[in-house]
Image (spheres, grey):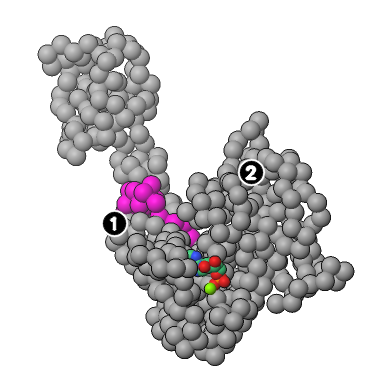
Amino acid sequence: MSVVPRARAGSRSRNNVSVPADLITIAEARERVLAAVSPLGHERIPVADALDRVLAGAVHAIGDVPPFPASAMDGYAVRAGAAGRELAVVGESRAGSPSEHDLQEGEAIRISTGAAVPSGATAVIPQENVEARDDRIVTGAAVSEGEHVRAAGEVMRTGTAVLAGGVTLGPAELGAAVAAGAAEVEVALRPRVHVLCTGDELREPGAPLGPGEIYNSNGPMLAALAAHCGALAAAPQLLPDDRTATEAGLEAALEAAEVVIVSGGVSVGPHDHVKPALTGLGVREVFWGVALQPGKPTWFGVRGDRLVFGLPGNPVSAAVTFSLFAAPALAALQGIAVQPRTGAEAVLGVPVRRNRRREQALRVRLERRDGATVAVPNGPQDSHVIVSLLGADALALIPPGEGSLEQGARVALARLPR
Ligand code: AMP
Ligand code: MG
C-alpha cells in the first residue's frame, strides 16, 4: 500500500471521517462486510440445547401464563370482605392439586402459593392475617377483590410475542420460552469458522521456544472470539510462511467453513503470502486497507458464500479487527440486524493524541462519573501489547486529525466481544 503524501486530498465518507484516498473508513469497511453477508438459515432444536443461540423468529405464548388464577401467598381462598368474619375451612388447594370445591359465602379453602384459586373465591387472605381455630378461621384484616391472586394471563396472554426474532437466548430467555409453552425453538444455524495463523515464528501453546520464536496467541484468542459470537470454531491451525502451504491450508478451510479468518501475513513483506494465495484461490478482494490504528492492512474478500478475513498478526490488531469486522459478519450470518455503528458514545477521560490519517480504536475501560460514561484508555495502546485487552470494556473510536482530542470530547464506542 502506498504511503499517502501529506498534501494529498483525503476522501470524506458518510460518517464524516476524512481518510487518505487509498484507505476506507471503519464504517465503510463494515458496510462492505455486511453487504456481503446473507443469513445462513435456521434449524429447530430443543430449548435445553439453545443457550447462546439466536432466535430465527418470534416465540409466542401458546397459552395464558399463569394458565389459571393462582394464589400469590400461603393462606386461605375466600370471598372478599371485612375483617372479623368467621369462615369454615372446607378443603385445600395445593400447587398441582386444585380443590374441586365451589366456594360459598362463609367458607374458606386453605391454599398454597401457586395453587389454583377455586371457583367462587375472589381473594386470598395470607395465613398471618387469620386466626385459625380447628376447622374454622377468623379473618384478621379486610380483603378486597383480587387481592393476592395472580390473574390468568397476567404474565403473558395466549399469542403474546414473548421473544423477538434475532434475540440471543440467555438463561432468562430459555426460561421465558418454556413458560410460554415452547419445547423447541427455531434458531439460526451457527456459522462454521476456521482460524489459520501464518508465521514461521509461531509455536503451539506451551511448546519450548527456539530462537526468535513466540507463541501462537492469536489462534486460541480468535477461535474463542468466534465462539463468543456464536460460531462453531474449529481448532486453530498454524501455517508456515510459504505460498504453497498457505494456499493448501486456505483451500481446505474454504471448503470446511463459511468464514475463514487468517491472522498475519497480509502486509507486503517478502514473507507475506496470504493475499496472493487468496487471489490464486479465486477469493475476490472486497477491500484491503482500512484507515484504522491498529489494523491498517486488514483484508476482506469473498468466494461464493464464503467470507475471508485477513487480519494483521499483532495480537491487539487481530482482536480489534476481528471485533470491528468479523464479529458483525458472524452476527449478520445468524440473522441479527447489525448497524454499522453502535450509536453508543462516551466522553474521553484523558486527552488522546490523534493519528493524522487513521481512526484509532482505543481499548478503554468505561466508568460512570457524574452521570456520564467516561472512556479511560486501558494501558499502553501499542498493537503488540496484548494485556491492553484485559478488562477492556469497549473500543473508543478517535477520529483522525491533528493534535489531540481533548478530555471530555465525545467519542463513538464499538463493541469488544469477550
Ligand atoms: P504479520 O502480520 O505476519 O506481519 O505479524 C505482525 C506481528 O504479529 C509480528 O510480530 C508477528 O510475530 C506477530 N504475530 C503474527 N501472528 C501471530 C500469532 N498468531 N500470535 C501472536 N503473534 C503473532
Ligand atoms: Mg507474519
Instruction: Please name whichever residue, 239 or 119, is drawn nearer the observer in this view of the structure.
Output: 239
**Residue at image location 55% in from the left, 51% down from the top:** 388
Magenta-drawn stretch contains 177: yes
Numbered marks: total: 2
**Residue at image location 32% in from the left, 52% down from the top:** 178
Q: Residues within 10 Å of mark 2 (few under 14, many from 20)?
A: many
Residue projecting furthest to the top: 84
Secondary element type, mark 2: strand
Residue 93 drawn above or below residue 383: above
Question: Along the horizontal axis of the image, is 377 left or right of 211?
Answer: right
Residue projecting furthest to the left: 134
| Magenta region | 165-181
> Mark 1 or mark 2: which comes first in sequence?
1
Q: Residues within 10 Å of mark 1 (few under 14, many from 20)?
A: few
**Residue at image location 21% in from the left, 21% down from the top:** 107
Whether residue 413 is visible to the viewer of this picture, yes or no, is no
Q: Quadrant of residue 195?
A: bottom left
Whether residue 263 is visible to the viewer of this picture, yes or no, is yes
Instruction: Please name whichever residue, 295 or 286, is drawn nearer the observer in this view of the structure.
Output: 295
Secondary element type, mark 1: helix
Q: Position of residue 167 (x, y in %)?
A: 46, 57
**Residue at image location 48% in from the left, 68% down from the top:** 212
Mark 1 = which residue? 48
Residue projecting furthest to the right: 7
Disc 2 residue type? Ala
Question: Along the horizontal axis of the image, is 379 left or right of 25?
Answer: left
Marks 1/2 in contact by CB < 8 Å: the verdict is no
Q: Quadrant of residue 169?
A: bottom left
Magenta-drawn stretch contains 351: no
Disc 1 residue type? Ala
Mark 2 = which residue? 375
